[in-house]
Image (cartoon, grey):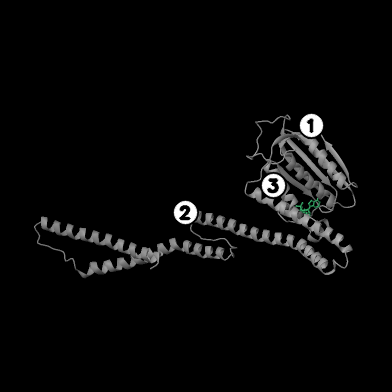
Amino acid sequence: MRSSTKLTLFSTFLILAVLMFQYLMLISEVNNDARSKGIDYSYNFYSIIPIIFLLVMGLIAFFISALIIDRIFNPLRLMISKIKEIGEIHFENPLIIDSGDDEIKEYVTAFNNMSAKISSYIERQKRFISDVSHELATPITVINGHADMLLRRGKSHPELLDSSLKIVKGEILKMDGLVNNLLFLARSDSGKQTYSFEVNDLTELISESAEEIEVIAPEFIIENEVQGDIFALCDAYALKRVLRIILSNAVRYSANSKRIWIKAYESHGLINISIKDDGIGIALEHLPRIFDRFYRVDDSRTKVTGGSGLGLSIAREIITAHGGEITVNCEAGTGCEFMLLLTAAKSNKPSSNLHLPNRTSSSKGC
Ligand code: ADP
C-alpha cells in the first residue's frame, strides 16, 4: 500500500475515533444528567441516526484527507519524475509547483538549483571530454599517418625519416602542452594548484615577457610604458605565464599592423596592466565566452594559429588565484585590450597585511 493511501486511512480513522469519543462523552453526559434529575432515561447507543452521521462524517473525512494528502504528496511525485529525468540526463525544464509561499516552495527552489547545477556539470563534463578527444585526435592521426608511412617506405626512402620524425616530434610537443594545460586546470579545480607568493617587481616581469616575445616575433614593435616601480605580492612564474599568454595571442591574432602596447601603473593600491593590440579583434558576441575552456572564436582561424582555447582560461585561473581580475575590451577589426587588476605591494619585502587568497607556496619563484 502506498504511503499516501496509508496516511489517508490513518487520518480518517483518527477523525472517526475523535468523533466516536465525543459521541460517547455526549451520551454519558446526557444519561448522567437524566439520572441526576431522577429521570429514568438511557440514550440508545445503537440508534440509527448517529451511525449514519458517523458514516457520513467518515466519508467526508476520508475525501478531505485524501485531498490534503494528495496536495502534500504531489510535489514529491513531480520531484521523483524529475529525479528520474536527471538519471536519464534529460533535465531541461525546472520543476514548477504552484504551492504558495511555504516550505514546499522553498524545497522546490532548492531542488531546482541543485538540478540546474547537476545538469550544467554533466553538460560541462560532456563538452570537456568531447573537446579533449577532439584536441588529441588530430596529433594522434598525424603521428599514426607518419608511422604508417615510415613502416611502408621508410626503409627504401631513408630521406623521409628526418622530416617525418620532426613532424611527429612537433605533434608530441603539442600533446604534451595540452596535457600540461589540462593538468594545471585540474589542479586549480581541485584547489591543489600551488603558488609561490613573493613581492616581485612587475616592471621587471613585464620587460622580461616583452623581450621574450620580441625574440619569438622580431617583426613586432612592443611599446612598453610602465610608470614607476610597481610591486605586487605574486607568483612571478605564474604571472609571467599570464603575460606570455596575452602577448602571444596579440602576436598570433595580429592583422597587418605589428604593434603591441603595454601599459602599467599603480593607483590607490591597485595595479592596472593593459596589453593592447590592433589585430583582428573579437566580435562582441564572443566576448562573454573567450575565458571558457576550449572556446575559440573561429575554429578554422585557430587551426592556422594553432591555439587550443585554453590560454585565457588558464590566465583567468592564475589572476583569480592572485585575488585579481582579468577583463577584456575588444571589437572585431580594431584589436583587443586585455586588462589585469592586481593588489599592489609597497615594498619589495614580503608584507603581512596584504589581502591574498589562502594558497600554499611551493611552485617555482621568479
Ligand atoms: P587559443 O589558444 O585558441 O588562443 P585562448 O584561450 O588564448 O586560446 O584564446 C581564446 C580565443 O580568443 C582564441 O581562440 C581567439 O579566437 C581569441 N583571442 C584571444 N586573444 C585574442 C586577441 N588578442 N585578438 C583576437 N582574438 C583573440
Residue 103: image tag? 2
The CA span between labels 3 and 2 is 38 Å
- Residue 319 at x, y percent in the picture: 71, 43
Q: Secondary structure at mark 1?
A: loop
The reply to whether the residue tagged 3 has its Cβ within 8 angstroms of ligand 1 is: no
- Residue 185 at x, y percent in the picture: 68, 50
Task: Check the image and report above or below for 252 versus 240.
Answer: below
Q: Judge by depth and name the residue closer to the eye, 43 or 125.
A: 125
The kind of residue tagged 3 is Glu
Task: Check the image and report above or below for 359 versus 108.
Answer: above
The kind of residue tagged 1 is Asp
Q: Secondary structure at mark 2?
A: helix
**In this figure, which residue is indicated by the disc labeled 1?**
229
User: Mark 3 or mark 2, which has the lower sequence index?
Assistant: 2
Going 80% across and 57% down the picture, which residue do you hit?
169
The CA span between labels 3 and 1 is 26 Å
Residue 317: image tag? 3
The CA span between labels 2 and 1 is 58 Å
